[in-house]
Image: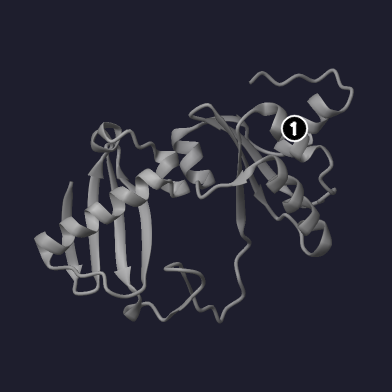
Amino acid sequence: MRVQKVNDSTIRIFISFTELADRDISMADLFQRSSKTEQLFWELIAQAREEVEFNLDQPFWIQATVATNDEFVITVMKQEDLGEIPISGKEKIKKKTSKPRVQERVYVFKDLEDLLTGIRDLPDFRQLKSSFFQYEDLYYLTLMKLGTGKKRQLAEALLDEYGDSSNLTRAFLIEHGRLIIADKAVQTLNASFNKPSVVSIQV
């Protein structure tokens, strides 16, 4: 692990995938903020305090990305340079004056049965875009254009009941996971498993 000080309010921490594996931490752990990754993060901050005199004594923002094929980078930036507003704890979002972009939602399911049950009664969204992935023995559903209002609330309630919201992105899953259905995953899975059909999907 190595720490790079960008300026007084920003550092980058580089970790190899081997170092993560030695600590029994997976990529999914990192994005889902497990107890193991929280412990690792504060160890890294302690290392940064000693090596580059970076004191994290105020609210901050974190971004975790894959830097290379064998290295992961965590960027830590103090709030003072962000123009952000606090949400809960130490989490922040940037103030937005422009029209918000369409949000991507990713849900993770422990098994295929939970996924199929979660999407069985979803409202019909005409513009819904969805993909289906498998990553580290878990199933992931990415969703775009999930609609608005009560239909969206109903959809999120169903998905939250049988799965969990994930911090993984579609781009990450494309690179590291197994793409099973690239487009119209919800419609395809419902047609194949939740309704009588001659279509089959091999998982």
Residue 179, picture quadrant = top right
* In this view, 88 is above or below 157: below
Residue 84, picture quadrant = bottom left
Along the viewing direction, whichever of 56 and 65 lies nearer the viewer: 56
* In this view, 119 is above or below 13: above
Figure colour scheme: one colour
Helix, strand or loop under label 1? helix
Please state which amino acid type lies under the numbered disc 1.
Answer: Leu
Residue 167: image location, x then y, percent:
51, 50
- Total label count? 1
According to the picture, the residue beneath numbered tag 1 turns out to be: 116
Q: Residue at x 37, y 62 (%)?
A: 62
Residue 177: image location, x then y, percent:
49, 32
Residue 121: image location, x then y, percent:
84, 42
Neighbor class of circle 1 (other Cα within 10 Å; few <14, some 14-19, many 20+) is some
Quarter occupied by the C terminus: top right
* In this view, 80 is above or below 134: below
* In this view, 44 is above or below 184: below
Q: Residue at x 80, y 32 (%)?
A: 190
Residue 149: image location, x then y, percent:
80, 65
Residue 6, picture quadrant = bottom left
- Does residue 108 appear to the left or right of 135 in the view shown? right
Q: Residue at x 23, y 54 (%)?
A: 44
Residue found farthest to the left: 51
